Image (cartoon, helix red, strand yellow):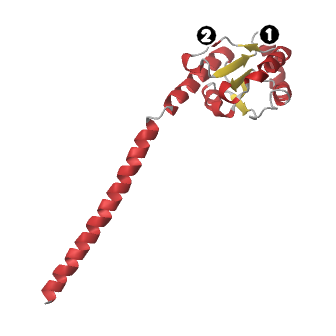
Amino acid sequence: MLGQRIAAWNARLLRRTLQWQLGVATVLAVVAVVGVADALDTRYGSRVAKAELGRFLLRKLGADAQIAGSPQWHMAGFCAQANYQPLPENDVFCRTMLADFSAEYQADAVLISRDHFPREHEPTLLAIRDRLGLRLVDEQQLPPGCRGEEMVLLREGPAAIDARVIRDR
């Protein structure tokens, strides 16, 4: 009788252990599948494009440049070894914030995501660009992953050197 009870108790313990191990294995399998799916997601291409744009800006502006831009492009600022300041994302920022912000910040580059920037504000942006001494980089000069995704405004030449000298004082 005692032997049967011990055998029954061992059988229950074995079933519980197997159920617990099966539960843990299932959870780990789900986490692994989600992790692999996330790693293979299209965001990888986006990260590569941002890194390429950062290296492009590093070559054009050098390290410690002042870059303002769309918040989702902060990785480009990191790869450019720059001081990156995210711009607000709303309809009003083109008319008011960009002009004030860029003048105060003395940005060497402004990155604006085409996905989050209303096309009807592009003429205003171009007027601000001229006033601030920035030029719109032709899409063909940008790294391939950034073409059509981002508008890049750069301060180049003597104006860029003057802005850096004033900023460093």
Question: Compared with residue 139, is residue 6 higher up or lower down, i.e. above or below?
Answer: below
Q: Provide the secondary structure element on which disc 1 rests.
A: helix
Q: Nearer the observer, disc 1 or disc 2?
A: 2
Please give left or right for residue 80 compared with residue 121 in the image.
left
Foreground residue among 106 and 114: 114
Give the x, y percent position of residue 164.
79, 20
Type of amino acid under label 1: Pro
Percent of width and height locating residue 122: 77, 20
| Residue 140 image label | 2
Residue at point 50%, 27% (across, down): 45
Residue 56 in view (yes/no): yes
> Is residue 169 in view?
no
Look at mark 1 in the image and give the residue it sits on. Answer: 158
Q: Residue 100 appears at what percent x and percent y?
A: 86, 28
**Quadrant of res 59:** top right
The correct choice, above or below, for 154 with respect to 27 in the image is: above
Q: In the rendered view, does 164 fall on the left or right side of 51?
A: right
